[in-house]
Amino acid sequence: MTIPPMLSIDPPTRRVSLDGRDPAFYGDPNAVYAALHAHCPTFYWEEQRQWFVTGYDIVNGLLRDRRFGRQILHIATREELGLAEPLPHLENFDLAERHSLLEIEPPEHTRLRTLVYRAFVSRHVERMKPELEELANRLIDGFEEKGEVELLSAFADVIPVTMIARMIGIPEEMGPQLLKWSHAYVRMYMFGRTRADEDAADQAAKEFADYVKNVIAERRANPSDDLLSHMIHTEHKGQFLTEDELVSTTIVLLNAGHEATVHQIGNSVRVILESGLDPAMLFKDEATTERTVEETLRIGAPVHIFQRWCLEACEIDGVAFKRGDKVSMILAAANLDPAKFTDPLTFRPDRNEAPNLSFGAGIHFCIGAPLARLELNVVLPILFQRLPHLRLARKPQVKDVYHFHGLERLDLAWPR
């Protein structure tokens, strides 16, 4: 396996040097992941000062390993771990994240997840299928006659944010503002973030939280048939969610409920068009549609990395970890492990191999996975059926937001 020029690997020490902001990397991370699998699947990333794992079995195991967690300050102090104090200019962001489902561990995680889980199980989200079909067709009606479209702004951006807003009980007209807040918010997770990114994220967190508080107050006075009203008025073992918990949970559901799916719609369309395979065959029935969607999730995952704190001393793949260490799992690389997937860099919807890890695993498995899968299984067939002979109008532009992976633009054309 050829090592890409931007990647430096020293297999004996498992040291890797790679600039995560290099367009040659984030533009085609799968080529780098393939080289890592061949030469150094568990490695210390010099620039990130952290251990990373890419092997499917190791990633899958770590996601479920209770010796590792999303938080650590519930078992040790900052002083004990040598951690710096929180940054004052991120006060609002940190407050919004304090009770995030993505960031907490049991028993708090169990209580919060139990209160929102019911809304996201498959039998409930399946009821949204007619709404999804109507929305997708209405959006395509708006650009079909033009013979060209920038798909992200006209289609991919709109569908997930509209559906998650409806589910939670946020007015649809707030969609554009929610997108602005979310885009600023998630840049906190980008490699090489700047002080300007941090200031923008903190401001977005404050405005987002203030807005959600107003909606909470309205729903307390006038409950409705939506997820936010359910979270406000339902107790779990005698406890109701606090206002801070409600704000954190609503923000994470809105962000996670659309950000990754926007990327995945774009990634999926790109993968299908670049494969040269006939979309009519890929979406000929529900079974082939489901296999196609799962394969696009495997080879074009929208979220690449999840981190865990080591909660107790242990050894993983020959690497010793002590309490307070961090390890990162590259989900997108695990999806390309040649030990699990034959010809892993090739789009093959007829695979019958391991399930992809794009939604994670264990107690932090993506609660919105049923909704995301429904959205992809509904809107992708409609898009390709409504616009036969769809093609790329120009080379897709990849967004500089690693460790997310998505497109800046996706310009498409079709015969009018």
Image: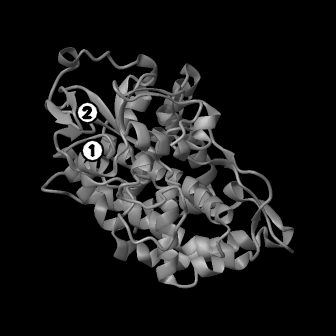
- Foreground of the two, 350 or 339: 339
Q: As shown in the figure, which amino acid type bears the numbered disc 1? A: Thr
Render colour scheme? one colour
In percent of width and height, residue 89 lies at 46, 19
In percent of width and height, residue 43 lies at 36, 32
Can residue 116 be seen here? Answer: yes
Image-based side of 98 in relation to 256, left or right: left
In percent of width and height, residue 151 lies at 70, 59
Residue 309 is labelled as: 2
Q: Secondary structure at mark 1?
A: loop
Disc 1 packing (10 Å; few <14; some 14–19; many ≥20): few
Could you say which quadrant of the image residue 315 lies in? top left
Residue depicted at 35% across the width and 53% down the height: 360
Badge 1 is on which residue? 242
Q: Secondary structure at mark 2?
A: strand
In percent of width and height, residue 175 lies at 60, 54
Label whose residue precedes the other's in the sequence (2 or 1) = 1
Q: As shown in the figure, which amino acid type bears the numbered disc 2? A: Trp
The correct choice, above or below, for 243 with respect to 288 in the image is: above
Can residue 375 be seen here? Answer: no
